[in-house]
């Protein structure tokens, strides 16, 4: 799970919805019994199965982020995009990636993925009011000929 070929993993609990990012895709399940259950502990196990002959030679964790949202006490939650974050939007497949991890939760409800019409187009890139450094934007597309 944690290697260069499979990438990052994450887990998200919102009410009864449990979301997992695993092997390049997001899986979400709904468990009504867990809607009001709080997460009290996080366990992370790295190892191998007893009868496996494939030895793990790098048992390391480079980062672990924990966050609790929707709390009654005000806390300054950091910007979800740290400096240097790479956000990719795949309009053809209706997918959003942040640093290589599928993050369609960033899609604004009521929005639409779109295609570029023939000819010139103008795209407006908005940023947060508190950000005074213009973002670096790179746009790539495939031209289709009819």
Image (cartoon, rainbow, N blue to C red):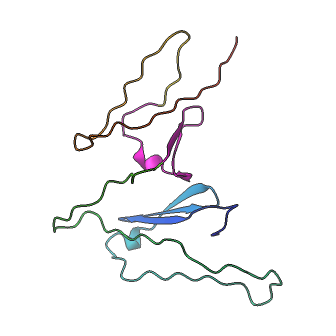
Measured along the vertical axis of the image, is residue 61 above or below residue 109? below
Asked if the magenta segment contains residue 107, the reply would be: yes
36 vs 93, nearest the viewer: 93
What x and y, as percent, mark residue 63?
A: 49, 71
Query: Quadrant where the C terminus lies?
Result: top right
Give the total of numbered labels.
Answer: 0
Residue plotted at (48% across, 50% down)? 103
What x and y, as percent, mark residue 109?
A: 36, 39
In the image, taking residue 58 as reference, residue 126 lies left or right, namely left
In the image, taking residue 5 as reference, residue 35 lies left or right, namely left
In the image, taking residue 64 as reference, residue 143 lies left or right, namely right
In this view, the residue farthest toward the right is 53
Measured along the vertical axis of the image, is residue 140 above or below residue 135? above
46 vs 21, nearest the viewer: 46
Measured along the vertical axis of the image, is residue 63 above or below residue 117? below
Residue plotted at (80% across, 84% down)? 52
Please state the extent of the stretch shown in magenta in the rendering. Answer: 86-112
Report which quarter residue 49 is drawn in.
Answer: bottom right
127 vs 96, nearest the viewer: 127
Asked if the magenta segment contains residue 144, the reply would be: no
Query: Quadrant where the N terminus lies?
Result: bottom right
In this view, the residue farthest toward the bottom is 50
What x and y, as percent, mark residue 4?
A: 67, 63
Residue plotted at (67% across, 61% down)? 6
In the image, taking residue 45 as reference, residue 69 lies left or right, namely left
Report which quarter residue 37 is drawn in.
Answer: bottom left
Residue plotted at (75% across, 90% down)? 50
What x and y, as percent, mark residue 105?
A: 43, 49
């Amino acid at each position: 799970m944690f290697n260069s070929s499979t990438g990052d993993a994450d887990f998200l609990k919102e009410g009864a919805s449990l979301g997992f990012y695993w092997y390049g895709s997001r899986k979400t399940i709904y468990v009504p019994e867990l809607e009001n259950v709080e997460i009290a502990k996080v366990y992370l196990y790295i190892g191998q199965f007893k009868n496996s002959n494939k030895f793990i030679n790098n048992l390391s964790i480079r980062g672990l982020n924990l966050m609790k949202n929707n709390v009654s006490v005000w806390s300054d939650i950091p910007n979800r995009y740290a400096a240097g974050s790479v956000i990719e939007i795949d309009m053809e497949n209706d997918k959003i990636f942040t640093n290589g991890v599928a993050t369609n939760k960033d899609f604004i409800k009521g929005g639409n993925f779109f295609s570029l019409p023939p000819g010139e187009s103008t795209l407006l890139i908005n940023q947060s009011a508190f950000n005074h450094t213009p973002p670096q934007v790179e746009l790539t597309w495939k031209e289709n000929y009819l």
